Amino acid sequence: MDRSFPMTRAAGLSRLSDFLEGAGAAYAADRNTDRGPASAATTSALSPYLRRRLLTEAEVAAAAEAALGDEGAAKFVSEVFWRTYFKGHLETHPSAWTQALALAASDGDRLATEPGLRRTYAAAVEGRTGIDGFDDWARDLVETGWLHNHARMWFASIWIFTLRLPWALGADFFLRHLLDGDPASNTLSWRWVAGLHTRGKHYVARAENIRRYTDGRFDPVGLDEYPDALDEPKPPREVALPRADAVPEGDIALLLHLDDLNPESLPLAGARVVRIGGLIAPAEAACDRVRAADAAAMADALARAEAYFQCPAGPAGIDWAQGLPVVTPWAPVGPSAAALPPGCLRVRRAWDEAAWPRSTRGYSRLRSVIPTLLGA
């Protein structure tokens, strides 16, 4: 699989087209199989583009249904909605994010005072555990910024249940290196593997499963295949979904951020965009590859926005808005939301407005209405 990800909308559209003409037809049957980087892809590998909304979920789902039909596209579209579900769930359970950050910080402090934990952690992130497959995935992640989704699940399970490492440090390791590192999908996926997202329901990596779905490339020994799920004293509390803001009429300044780089399709009603700024707020300690991808994606979005709205676009420096009302696409819980300047008017896409209120509990509630949402 091609693991280069040029961070432009054009590159994302090209990858989408290649997927729908190739692996898309066999996606439901093959998506769990990881045949390795030298083999043809079994997934779309669109997540770096969806994470930054260089491509929107709505257009990807529509393209899949047009190319594969409703039935042929159903599994792929459901997986696209998983990303939407995680965002909506974190919006209504924001303490899951703040707790993860706090745990990663406190567990990171433990590395300085607990030699055994420090040695195990270092072996894990450097790919020196001796566990077949796991070490390859650790090195692949650092070297390429990418892992097959099934490999991510195996890795997280082995990290938590076999190596007995803190889950939040694993989530932090992923977020620093993944080109598609998304606060919601990453945090809640690690919590799900641990048995915290759905309490008591954890994901266990088994040697037979790894053997089967890597076509025999890996055959690990010594895995803990019968662990108990993790628990926590205080699960994240549900809060009401915050309301989006109305877009004012007249001249506005548009602020773009890394969670939504598709300015051409924003619901801006009767506003007139006369200035455009870009705000880059990467994950803390993000690696150079991720920072470069973020910068390239923002540069592409600003260039497209400048051409589309026919006005100046550039980094959001001091007084870039020149006193105009600042409108920004909704930034889900994470670094972008935390970095937004006060007073921004936040607009939300119809896709999120429809899906997020159905994402407060388990995924099945959202999944059951996918045909209705797509029809709308």
Image (spheres, helix red, strand yellow):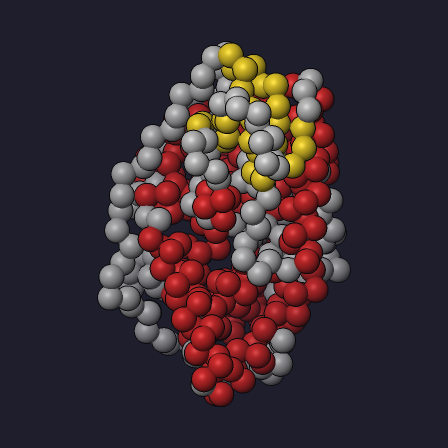
Q: Position of residue 100 (x, y in %)?
A: 40, 60
Q: Observer-nearest residue: 246 or 235?
A: 246
- At x 43% / y 36%, what residue is drawn? 342
Q: Is residue 342 above or below residue 146?
A: above
How many numbered badges does the structure rendering display?
0
- At x 59% / y 44%, what residue is drawn? 280
Q: Position of residue 190 (x, y in %)?
A: 44, 61
Q: Position of residue 208 (x, y in %)?
A: 51, 72
Q: Observer-nearest residue: 353 or 202?
A: 353
Res 50 visible: no
Q: Residue furthest bottom?
A: 115
Q: Is residue 255 above or below residue 337?
A: above
Q: Observer-nearest residue: 316 or 264?
A: 316
Is 11 placed left or right of 63 in the picture? right
Q: Observer-nearest residue: 260 or 46?
A: 260
Q: Position of residue 11 (x, y in %)?
A: 72, 38
Is 88 placed left or right of 294 in the picture? left
For the C terminus, the quadrant is top left
Q: Quadrant of residue 287?
A: bottom right
Q: Is residue 96 above or below residue 208?
A: above
Q: Quadrant of residue 191?
A: bottom left
- At x 70% / y 35%, what residue is drawn? 300
Is 147 placed left or right of 104 in the picture? right
Res 199 visible: yes
- At x 45% / y 85%, what residue is drawn? 114
